[in-house]
Amino acid sequence: MKFKMRILHFSPAGNAEAIAFAISKAQQASCDKIPPAYPIEKEKLAFIGFEMKGAKVDKNVANLCNDLSTTRVKNVAIYAVGGKFDGVAEIKEIIKSKGINIVGDTFECSVKTGLFGKGKVTEGDIKAATEWADKIVDSMLE
């Protein structure tokens, strides 16, 4: 781990979790579900990932972001998985209102749903997400 960071995910279908585990492994950082077992404390960076099923972000994700402060985390990077990403702006506004820096662009991963409405992230999606995370971390080392 290059500095203190956490990777968090809200993942009812397992897609944001797959990305979170890949980023966690690549960055040698701890990974946890939202809500986390232990609160975020004194992190330089938190990756917050969630799945979007519609226009609204799940209340667990919104609650986590509302509980953040600059003493808990200095920077946040956001990734979202799903079909629509309307709720990402809401999460960004909550985080910005806390005085926390949002690092880089949001990584948005569209997942095509199959016949039964469940889509899965591909190896290509996971690779793109880890490359995005590498760029975020590297930018903070400069």
Image (cartoon, rainbow, N blue to C red):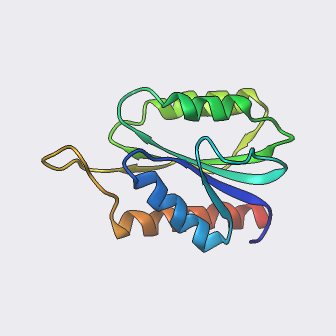
Would residue 118 be seen by someone viewing this image from the given angle?
Answer: yes
Direction from residue 136 to residue 5 in the image, left or right: right
Q: Position of residue 63 (x, y in %)?
A: 63, 29
**Closer-to-camera residue (13/48):** 13
Total numbered badges shown on the rendered structure: 0
Q: Quadrant of residue 34?
A: top right
**Closer-to-camera residue (110/19):** 19
Query: Which image quarter holds the C terminus?
Result: bottom right
* Residue at 65%, 35% in the rendered image: 64
* Residue at 67%, 48% in the rendered image: 37
Would residue 142 be seen by someone viewing this image from the given angle?
Answer: no
Direction from residue 74 to residue 120 in the image, left or right: left
| 5 vs 85: above or below | below
Q: Position of residue 131 (x, y in %)?
A: 53, 68
| 18 vs 49: above or below | below
Query: Which image quarter holds the N terminus?
Result: bottom right
* Residue at 26%, 52% in the rendered image: 119
Q: Position of residue 57 (x, y in %)?
A: 48, 30
The extreme left residue here reads 115
Direction from residue 109 to residue 40 in the image, left or right: right
